[in-house]
Amino acid sequence: MRSAKDFFAPLAVGAPAPAREIPWRPSRVIHFFDPSNAKMAAKLPTLIPKVDVLLGNLEDGVRADNKLAAREGLIKIIDGGAEFGDTQFWIRVNSIDSPWGLDDLLTLVPAIGAKLDVIMLPKVQGAEDIHYIDRLLAQLEAQAGLTRPILVHAILETARGVSNVEEICAASPRMQGLSLGPADLAADRRMKTTRVGGGHPGYLVRQDPTPDDPSAVRATFQQDPWHYTLARMVDACVAHGIMPYYGPFGDIADTLACEDQFRNAFLLGAVGAWSLHPVQIDIAKKVFSPEPKDVAWASRVVETMGDGTGAVMVDGTMQDDASVKQCQVILDLARRLAA
Ligand code: GLV
Ligand code: MG
């Protein structure tokens, strides 16, 4: 079975790029489209080469009376001979608690399963949801004669899902990764934000008073309400060898805040994010790729460290066995993106 597990396998220090095939190109941008929208579908041939993952969305964002049209739209796209090249093809099915989730799977796996890389499953609460889809997929794949197993990506968007994040990651070898679902999660937790992702002007920390001037103006610093969940998600994913993603950023016009939110996720260890509008594609690709200056610095450190053990000074900074590993992360990502 294909597996995402070796994505995080550490490279031996100083070892050349592995000769084996890299199974998963990093998926910096998962671009969502509505398959019930014929105008959007017509644009896919020009869109596909620009994104790492193209995702046909059947869940939230698609009207209830368009669910069947969305399924039919996906089948039409595949039957029409869509070419994906290096781009992965995913779908987001409806939740297994909804009236449509089961039929999404029963209809689409036989019809388009051979082209499908990953099924994104929303509102996952625990390992039982992954076991359910795992067993169903095994039957449907066998029935359809599919030889390439379809992987599963879970959205972490309920308080129960966050509590069970470890068991979700470990529930099946099909697990490819997790995305944060900030809108549903905010609602489920009864958070008081109406934005999809991003910050809130009221979520801040105020500078301490100055002891000798208690009336001095005190600065405020906005905090990231998603930090805790994202960090928890990254740890769980890495511990189980699957990939963590930031999810959607709904304020399409606020490209600056989108970039900041994506960058926070990148710096914390996420490998990609969703794009809900073409304007977010380049933001995600830029943010989730290492900067050339960071790649150059990492190469210098690795070269200077020789066999990767001991300690050296580079431009006044101490480098040792651990910092070489940090640099290898940057170099590994750069190499995978160039492959
Ligand atoms: C995504 O599905 C979200 O709820 O944010
Ligand atoms: Mg959601």
Image: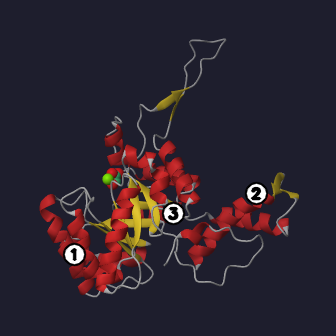
Q: Secondary structure at mark 3?
A: strand
Q: Quadrant of residue 43?
A: bottom left
Which residue is labeled 1 in the image? 107
**Location of residue 191 with respect to 335 vertically, above or below:** above
- Quarter containing the C terminus: bottom right
Q: Which mark is residue 48?
A: none
Question: Is tag 1's residue or tag 3's residue first in the polypeptide sequence?
Answer: 1
| 323 or 204: nearer the viewer | 323
Query: Gap between marks 1 and 3, in whole Å?
Result: 27 Å
Which residue is labeled 2 in the image? 323
Taking the spot 85% from the left edge, 69% from the top edge, the residue there is 306
The spot of residue 328 in percent (x, y) is 70, 66
Which mark is nearer the camera, 2 or 1? 1
Label 2 is placed on what type of residue?
Ser
| 275 or 78: nearer the viewer | 78
**Location of residue 174 with respect to 159 vertically, above or below:** below
Label 3 is placed on what type of residue?
Met
Q: Is mark 1 within 8 Å of ligand 2?
A: no
Which mark is nearer the camera, 2 or 3? 3
Label 1 is placed on what type of residue?
Thr
Q: Is residue 117 left or right of residue 105?
A: right
The spot of residue 329 in percent (x, y) is 66, 64
Q: State whether residue 253 appears in this view.
A: no
Q: Is residue 175 left or right of residue 32?
A: right
